[in-house]
Image (spheres, rainbow, N blue to C red):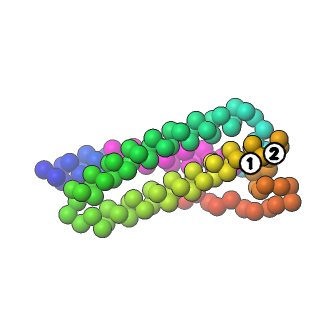
């Protein structure tokens, strides 16, 4: 019975992972824009960030159930670590984009000043 329950939870978790991938793809596109001077884009990022907080809570609950039901939870912990690494990296970039937008009237996505040429990390899947 627990294998059937685990399979159901894994399917639900797959949906959460798909949503995170969509967010990561969006952030990858947005961070390549030269400037974020559009209030619409800034509001989109903020709205998506709110959704991601809910998504993380849902993922955490599902993953916790999977780990509890699993005979070998160690192999399940890798899924959590992979998801969390991808999640926090994307959230960090999105929050930085929002912060940069509020710091200057014409923020650059490649750094905090025009002379700064830091590169953004690649979001892995």
For mark 1, give the secondary structure: helix
Task: Classify mark 2: residues with Cα within 10 Å, few (<14), some (14-19) or many (20+).
Answer: few
Determine if the magenta segment contains residue 14: yes
Residue 114, can we see it? yes
Q: Position of residue 15 (x, y in %)?
A: 39, 43
Determine if the magenta segment contains residue 118: no
Q: Is residue 122 left or right of residue 65?
A: right
Kindly identify which residue carries mark 2: 104
Q: Quadrant of residue 48?
A: top right
Residue at image coords 63%, 52%: 93
Q: Position of residue 105 (x, y in %)?
A: 83, 41
Kindly identify which residue carries mark 1: 100
Tell me the chief SS of the magenta region. Answer: helix
Badges 2 and 1: C-beta atoms under 8 Å apart?
A: yes
Q: Is residue 72 left or right of residue 105?
A: left
Residue at image coords 32%, 48%: 62
Residue placed farthest to the top in the image? 40
* Count of labels in the image: 2
Residue at image coords 18%, 49%: 4
Q: Is residue 40 left or right of residue 78?
A: right
Q: Nearer the viewer, residue 61 or 7?
A: 61
- The answer to whether 73 is drawn above or below residue 51 in the figure is below
Q: Position of residue 22 (x, y in %)?
A: 53, 44
- The answer to whether 89 is drawn above or below residue 33 in the figure is below
Q: Position of residue 36 (x, y in %)?
A: 75, 42
Residue placed farthest to the left in the image? 1
Q: Which mark is residue 35?
A: none
Identify the magenta region: 12-31
């Amino acid at each position: 019975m627990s294998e059937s329950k685990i399979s159901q939870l894994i399917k639900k978790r797959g949906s959460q992972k798909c949503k995170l991938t969509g967010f990561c793809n969006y952030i990858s596109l947005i961070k390549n824009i030269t400037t974020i001077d559009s209030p619409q884009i800034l509001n989109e990022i903020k709205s998506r960030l709110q959704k991601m907080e809910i998504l993380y809570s849902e993922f955490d609950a599902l993953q916790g159930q999977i780990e509890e039901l699993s005979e070998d939870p160690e192999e399940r912990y890798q899924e959590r670590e992979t998801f969390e690494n991808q999640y926090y990296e994307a959230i960090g970039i999105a929050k930085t984009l929002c912060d940069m937008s509020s710091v200057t009237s014409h923020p650059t996505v490649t750094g905090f000043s025009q002379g700064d040429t830091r590169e953004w990390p690649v979001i892995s899947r």
